[in-house]
Amino acid sequence: MNKLITLTMVLLFFTACSNQPAKVKQYYRLSADYDISQNTQKNKRQSVVISRPKAMGILGGRPMVATKKDGALVQLNNHYWLESPSILLHHSLTKWAEQHWQHIQTNAGFNEKHQRLDSEILAFEKDGNQVKVSLKFILNDVDGRLLFNQTYRQNLTIQGEGYAQFVQTVNLAVKRILDALSQTLDKLS
């Protein structure tokens, strides 16, 4: 009986020692908000429908994604986006579009006459000390004809340690991509 009590006490002691405090889950926003007051374009396009960006599998979830040394993508267990990258990017795109179009819609019937901007998230991840963001944009005119189909990529070095700096670098990458998209759009005018 004493052996059983001693063994139980030893097991309880080791179990208590091996318990580590639970890690707190952290949530981050995408805030590559565009300052529409910078718009100098007087002749804005009439209207556009901006659909929610598509995302390939693992990139569309709320957990942040990192690339391992062998190239495999993994979801992080304690670092999450506030919403999926598709939803967060959709908000940034609709805000950005205010400098180029008079009317922005997020859905419309196909028989309505609007330009249509579709997008896809191809990369949105941490790779060591790098941020990789790759976004594909397809713009069609009001008659459905292709105006452009282009992929923009940003690979930026994260300045500092931690996921707050990762998020800050993702925001910078998205802003640079939207700047490049603006230049492409301005060339169509």
Image: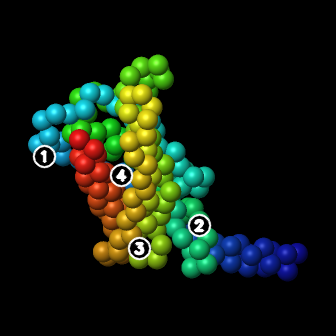
Classify mark 1: residues with Cα within 10 Å, few (<14), some (14-19) or many (20+): few
Residue kind at label 4, given as amino acid type: Leu
Q: Earlier in the sequence, mark 1 or mark 4?
A: 4
Would residue 124 be found to the left or right of residue 157 on screen?
right
Residue kind at label 2, given as amino acid type: Leu
**Cα–Cα span, label 1 and label 4:** 21 Å
- Find residue 107 and report its horizontal and vertical position in percent: 43, 27
Query: Do we see residue 2 in this rendering?
Result: no
Query: Do we see residue 142 in this rendering?
Result: yes
Q: Which residue is mark 4?
A: 30
Classify mark 4: residues with Cα within 10 Å, few (<14), some (14-19) or many (20+): many
Residue kind at label 3, given as amino acid type: Gln
SS of the residue under disc 1: helix
Q: Are marks 1 and 4 in contact (CB under 8 Å)?
A: no
Q: Which residue is mark 2?
A: 73
Q: Nearer the viewer, residue 146 or 138?
A: 146
SS of the residue under disc 3: strand
Q: Residue at the location (57% across, 79% down)?
A: 69
**Cα–Cα span, label 3 and label 2:** 14 Å
Q: Is residue 20 above or below residue 178?
A: below
**Cα–Cα span, label 2 and label 1:** 37 Å
- Find residue 179 and report its horizontal and vertical position in percent: 26, 54
Q: Earlier in the sequence, mark 2 or mark 1?
A: 1
Quadrant housing residue 49: top left
Q: Earlier in the sequence, mark 4 or mark 3?
A: 4
Q: Is residue 65 above or below residue 128?
A: above
Residue kind at label 1, given as amino acid type: Gln
Indicate which label's residue lies in the foreground, 4 or 3: 3
Q: Are marks 2 and 1 in contact (CB under 8 Å)?
A: no
Indicate which label's residue lies in the foreground, 1 or 3: 1
Q: Which residue is mark 1?
A: 38
